[in-house]
Image: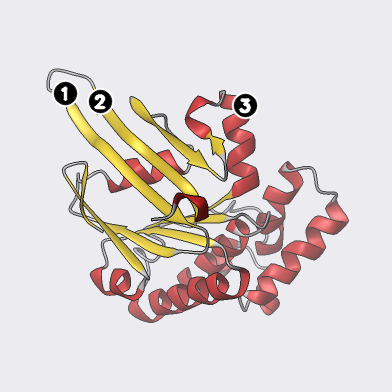
Amino acid sequence: MNDKSSIIEIRNLSKVYPGGVEVRALDGIDLDIQKGEFLSIIGPSGSGKSTLLHMIGILDTPTSGTITIDGRIVTDMSEKERSKARNEILGFVFQYHHLLPDFTALENVMMPLLIAGTNKKNAREVASGILKDVGLAERMDHLPSQLSGGQAQRVSVARALANNPGIVIGDEPTGNLDTKSSDMIYDLLRKLNHEKGQTFILVTHDEKMAKKTDRVIRLVDGKIYED
C-alpha cells in the first residue's frame, strides 16, 4: 500500500495478555488502510480480529507497536485525548445495537453530537437528516423496543455517522440479524461508503459478507495470514 494515501498505518503491533500462560493476541501486525476503503477482517475465534479492531478503535492499548490514524499517533495519546479522538474521527457499529432504551431513535442519534458540543437544535437537524438517509423517517420518535432488529441496527448505523467520522468500524454489525436484514445493513454501509467516501472496517464471521468487501484481511494466531 502507498503510505501517502493511508488513513491508518499500523506498525509492528503486538498485544500480549500476561498470566500463567502468556497469550499473544496480536503478533507484529503491519497494515495500511487507505482512505475510502471498504474492507473486512476475518479469522477463526481467537485469531485476534476483535483485539485488532479495538486497537484501531482506540478502545485498547497495544503492548508494543504504533497506530497512526489520520496523521495522529493514537497509541501515544492520553486517555482524555483518546476519548476525544474516538468521538471526532471514528464511528462504531456493534453486533448488538446498544441503543439507550429510554430514548427515541432521534435522541439516540443526537447523543454523539450533543457530547461533541453541538447545540440541541443543530443536533436534531443533523440526526433527523441521517435517519432519513437510512430509511427511518417514519421511526424517529420510536423507542428501541418499538423497532425491529434491522431497524434498531439502522439507528445504530445512523448514530455511528452522526459526527461525520472519517472511519466507521463495525464489529459483527450483522451478526445478530436474519439474512434479509443483514443484506439490508450491508447494502446501506456500502451505499454510504460510495456516497461519503468514508473508510469502513468490518470484523465478521460471515464469509459471504467478507467476499463482498473490496479487501479481506485474514488473521490467524495474531498474524496476518492473507491480505
Q: Which residue has dot 2 on it?
A: 17
The alpha-carbon separation of the residues under discs 1 and 2 comes to 6 Å
- Residue lying at 41% horizontally and 39% vertically, measured from the top left: 55
Position of residue 5 in the picture relative to residue 178 (left or right): right
Image quarter where the N terminus lies is bottom left
Give residue 94's mark: none
Q: Secondary structure at mark 1?
A: loop
Residue type beneath disc 3: Lys
Name the image quarter holding the C terminus: bottom left
- Neighbor class of circle 3 (other Cα within 10 Å; few <14, some 14-19, many 20+) is few
Q: Are marks 1 and 2 in contact (CB under 8 Å)?
A: yes
Q: Quadrant of residue 29?
A: top left
Relative placement, left or right, of 131 versus 42 is right
Q: Establish if 167 lies above or below 181.
A: above
Q: How many other residues sit within 10 Å of disc 1, few (<14), some (14-19) or many (≥20)?
A: few
Report x, y in % for residue 202. 39, 59
Depth check: give the residue in front, 5 or 70: 5
Residue labelled with disc 1: 22
Contact flag, marks 3 and 1 (Cβ < 8 Å): no
Badge 3 is on which residue? 80
Name the residue located 62 percent from the left edge and 79 percent from the top edge.
135
In the rendered structure, which amino acid carries the disc numbered 2? Tyr
